[in-house]
Image: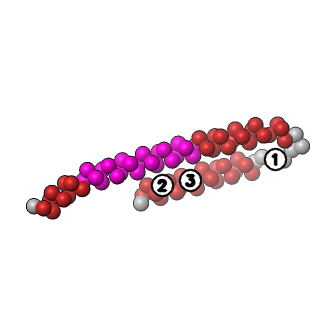
Amino acid sequence: MIIAQSFTMDMNSLRSEMRVKLEGLTPCRHNEIFKPIIADRHLNWLLKLSELVDKHYKELVVAKVKEQQRRPTEELVEAV
């Protein structure tokens, strides 16, 4: 549950950061100039998103492994 909350907070932060960057762009007649900039910003946003998902997925896997390691011990204690 804590991992899910952390992921949600990080996602909201990333969304607001991206919104600020996109709002900072101004329309221009020479759209060709801005297309590479916008594409670059989207790519950076996607890379950050990918890193965020990787980070939280690893945390989730570690938590699951720890839970599974703990479970046999708890089952042994209950059996005794």
Q: Which residue is tagged 3?
A: 11
N-terminal of the two: label 2 or label 3? 2
Please state the horizontal and vertical placement of residue 21, each as a whole percent of the image.
70, 47
Question: Which quarter of the figure has residue 37?
Answer: top right
Please report the bounds of the magenta region as a residue range.
48-70
What kind of element bears circle 2? helix
Residue type indicated by callout 1: Thr
Q: Amino acid at mark 2?
A: Ser
Percent position (x, y) of residue 78? 15, 62
Residue beneath disc 2: 6
What is the number of the mark on residue 65? none
Q: Is residue 7 left or right of residue 33?
A: left
Q: Residue at x 67, y 43 (%)?
A: 42
Residue at the far right: name it.
Answer: 29
Residue 68 painted magenta: yes
Q: Earlier in the sequence, mark 3 or mark 1?
A: 3
* Mark 3 secondary-structure assignment: helix
Label drawn at residue 26: 1
